[in-house]
Image (cartoon, rainbow, N blue to C red):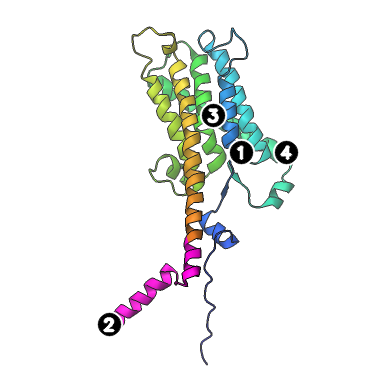
Amino acid sequence: MPAKKTPAAEPLTVGSSEYDSKMYPVEPNGIELMLGGMFSAMALVSPRRGLNLYESPAKYLCVSATVLFGYYAILTFADIYCFKVTDSQRRRTRTLGSRFTAVLKMGLATLASALVLSIVFVLFGAPIFSQHGETYMAAVNVSFLAVTPAILTLKADIGAWRKALLSLQPKTLPEKWAAGFFWCTMVTCWAGAYFVPMDWGRPWQRWPIPIVGGAFLGYLIGLMFVAIRCFVIPLGRADFNETERQKREMTRQPPPTARSADQGSSETKKLK
């Protein structure tokens, strides 16, 4: 009996479900980029004249941490962080209890990471027997800026955490997203700590003002970084693929894979 011919695989086109599942397993959502810049600016604005980072740093950092928690709580409760959920039915049937549970888990995970960061701050020279409130509240703010995006994006996937934060080449969009916020924030936070031991006598050199300022600066840099890496570049690649497909259709040229196969068969014939 003659063998059955398998149908030829149709080329993937931009916009088709199969193409999106292979090229874009998750769809980025830009709402948190706009809200992130707005809420980070709100966290830096003092609500009262006497409440500022110079006179009462612990209270000021508590207020800024509350603003950041409200930002992440809104995104977590609305289920729009950090990538759009493709299964709209699952989003509709999600109960209020599960949404509040997700917000609670986010807050507890951030506080736990802040405890680890505060220990790291002490090991790297933060005051041990004084300014405990300032140290921990600074760690809470840095955790919201650097670690919480990874908590909400990567969930409990240890392998994704390792590739995003310890590998130099994160693969997926969530890994690139988490790595952008984490490293931009932590690098500028570490750079800000360089000014603390200087004997310049400036008021902004007091602990923990430089590291908090560096963390917020790094977060804003991270916003621009992930916008380019997770939005602009993928959209450019999609447009390039669509343009190449249209060129092949207009010139009736075979796709690169088929062309390379024809060249390989012709070369084998020549060798024979």
Is any atom of residue 158 visible in this view?
Answer: no
Q: Nearer the viewer, mark 4 or mark 3?
A: 3
Measure the C-alpha gap from mark 1 to mark 3. 17 Å
Name the kind of residue labelled 2 in the image. Lys
> Label 2 belongs to which residue?
270
Q: Residues within 10 Å of mark 2 (few under 14, many from 20)?
A: few
Furthest toward the bottom, the residue is: 1
Q: Position of residue 233 (x, y in %)?
A: 47, 47
Q: Nearer the viewer, mark 2 or mark 4?
A: 2
> Label 4 belongs to which residue?
97
Element class at badge 4: helix
Q: Specify whether residue 160 is painted magenta.
A: no
Element class at badge 1: helix
Q: Residues within 10 Å of mark 3 (few under 14, many from 20)?
A: many
* Residue 164 drawn above or below residue 65: below
Closer to us: 235 or 196: 235
> Label 3 belongs to which residue?
144
Q: Position of residue 6 (x, y in %)?
A: 53, 79
Measure the C-alpha gap from mark 1 to mark 2. 58 Å
Are the residues tagged 2 and 4 within 8 Å (C-beta)?
no
Are the residues tagged 1 and 2 within 8 Å (C-beta)?
no
> Label 1 belongs to which residue?
31
Q: Is residue 160 left or right of residue 193?
A: right
